[in-house]
Image (cartoon, rainbow, N blue to C red):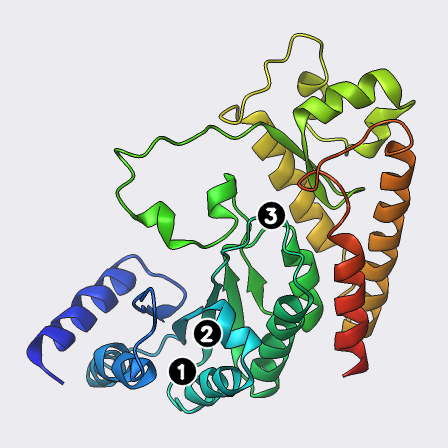
Amino acid sequence: MDESQLKLAKLCIDYQQGNDFKYIVIPTRYYEDNPTNYFLQSSDYFVEPFCTYLKKNSVDKPILLSVIIKSIMLTDADRFNQVLNWITSHQNINGVYLIFENNFSTKQIKVFEYLLNVLKIIDILKKNQLEVHIGYTNTEALLYSIAMPDSITIASYENLRNFGIKRFRDLEKTQMRAPNARLYSSHLLQWVDYNYIQSMKSLVSNYEEMFDDSDYKPLMFTPDFNWHFMKAEPYKHYFQVFSKQLATLPTEKLARIDSLKEIIKKAISNFTIIEKDVLLDDNSDGSHLPIWFNVINAFSKE
């Protein structure tokens, strides 16, 4: 390893130590198309220099290895095994910080194989006695929780609830279309476009029962509330509702699986009630839910 790699390790570790972070996180590098020697490069550039510096300075905090999981690593069997073998080959780490790249056009992930293999990779790493922490998740955090990861992040804006490289690039000259404001419902397992909420108000009796009570709901459901994706209340509502939903899942794995299946079936039933009178597009409807239910059954069977 050269001097620049050791310097990077020193700067990164000293910063984490100086801020008294609970873990020392080894970073990674994003490639549009991973080179053939990607894992070898990652070990040379990051893992070995960091572990060398940590050992030299007797840092005794747990170590997490950052890994960006591309879709092809989940859908190609050889690459799936390769990433697992690479992660588990490092004896000095305590766990992983997984970032699943999300290039899907829909707001909810609806690809059976992708979701099932996310659960598999979490489960295998846990069985190898590694901590698993997951970044950049949307509502699928509930689904991922059945593989019993140690933590899952939740975030505010839409582009923080999934990982795509676009948001890290210079988009100054690119025209971006502002998204419509959306509201999360634990009863639907979905973020619903506010335009449909207005339709539901007119056409669905007791429509408010589809949306959770929170400190922010009374304000948002007043006639003069100005819905806009930059308004803070929908996100504060989400943090309060979704964190509570995650916290109320059973702590035992099989019980959690059964509980989530019931939550999904209830959500599908609620969408059936709504769609008797209000038609929803595929970013506000429940079209992801049958796929998630089937993924859970496949994971349970394996």
What residue lies at 39% left-to-right and 68% top-to-bottom? 23
Does residue 231 sit above or below 75 in this rendering?
above
Residue contact between numbered discs 2 and 1, judged by CB atoms under 8 Å: yes
Q: Which mark is residue 144?
A: none
Residue 207 in view: yes
Residue situated in front as seen by the camera: 138 or 13:
138
Ranked by sequence position, the earlier of labels 2 and 3 is 2
Identity of the residue furthest to the left in this view: 3
Q: Say which amino acid is labelled 2.
A: Val
Q: Amino acid at mark 1?
A: Ile
Badge number at residue 96? 2
Q: Nearer the viewer, mark 2 or mark 1?
A: 2
* Amino acid type indicated by mark 3: Thr
Quadrant location of residue 74? bottom right
Which element type, helix, strand or loop, lies under badge 2?
A: strand
| In the displayed structure image, the side of residue 32 where residue 50 appears, left or right | left
Return the residue at label 3. 106
x then y, percent, for residue 203: 87, 19
| Residue 148 in sight | no
Q: x%, y% of residue 88?
A: 46, 88
Q: What residue is pinned by disc 1?
A: 93
The nearer-to-camera label among 2 and 3 is 3
